[in-house]
Amino acid sequence: HYLPSKFDGEQIQYGLHPEFVDNLSPVLRLAVDRGIEHVGLTKEQINRWVVHPGGITVVQCLKNTMGLPDGDLDVEIGLDTIRSQGNTMSSLFLYNLKNYFNRGAFKEGDLAMLVGIAPGVEIGTLAARYQ
């Protein structure tokens, strides 16, 4: 019931149930904390937060959960991606990553935490160093 949808004859439109965001924040925090801990890093060592921007609400949830400031580049890129592409589900993550490269957001040696979010709420993390 978190992703109610409707078909308008051409496309399936998804919407986020308000309960989704209430449940996403603590799960997101737990997944990211475990992902960082698993690779022996701290939140302060992460330079970029590349997240599947499943909607403006999801991007705002990331911002609030991770304590990112207003105007943060990760938030701006996520919002730009969702506005330009819509939510294409899984492939949106790749569009978002492409926007990072197009904007020159990665500097040599940057550590990025890639976070994928799927309905149901499944979250995967991957730490990567840009070289």
Image: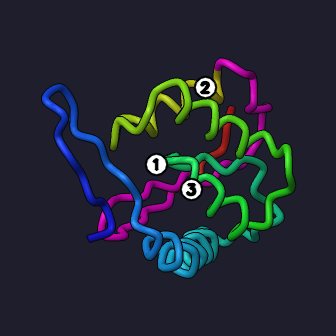
Residue nearer the viewer, 120 or 50: 120
Residue 14 belongs to magenta span: no
Residue 108 belongs to magenta span: yes
User: How many numbered marks appear?
Assistant: 3
Alpha carbon separation for disc pair 1 and 2: 15 Å
Quadrant of the image containing the N terminus = bottom left
Q: Residue at x 48, y 79 (%)?
A: 23
Q: Quadrant of residue 63?
A: bottom right
Q: Quadrant of residue 127?
A: bottom right
Q: Which residue is mark 3?
A: 57
Q: Residue at x 24, y 52 (%)?
A: 5
Q: Amino acid at mark 1?
A: Gly
Which is more N-terminal, label 2 or label 3?
3
Instruction: From this view, report whether residue 57 is shown above or below residue 78.
Output: below
Q: Which residue is mark 1?
A: 54
Asked if the residues shown at circle 1 and circle 2 are in contact, with their CB atoms under 8 angstroms apart, the answer is: no
Which is more N-terminal, label 2 or label 1?
1
Alpha carbon separation for disc pair 3 and 2: 19 Å
Residue nearer the viewer, 101 or 85: 85
Residue 28 image offset from top left, x and y in percent = 54, 71
Quadrant of the image containing the C terminus = top right
The secondary structure type at the circle numbered 1 is: loop
The secondary structure type at the circle numbered 3 is: helix
Q: Which residue is mark 2?
A: 99
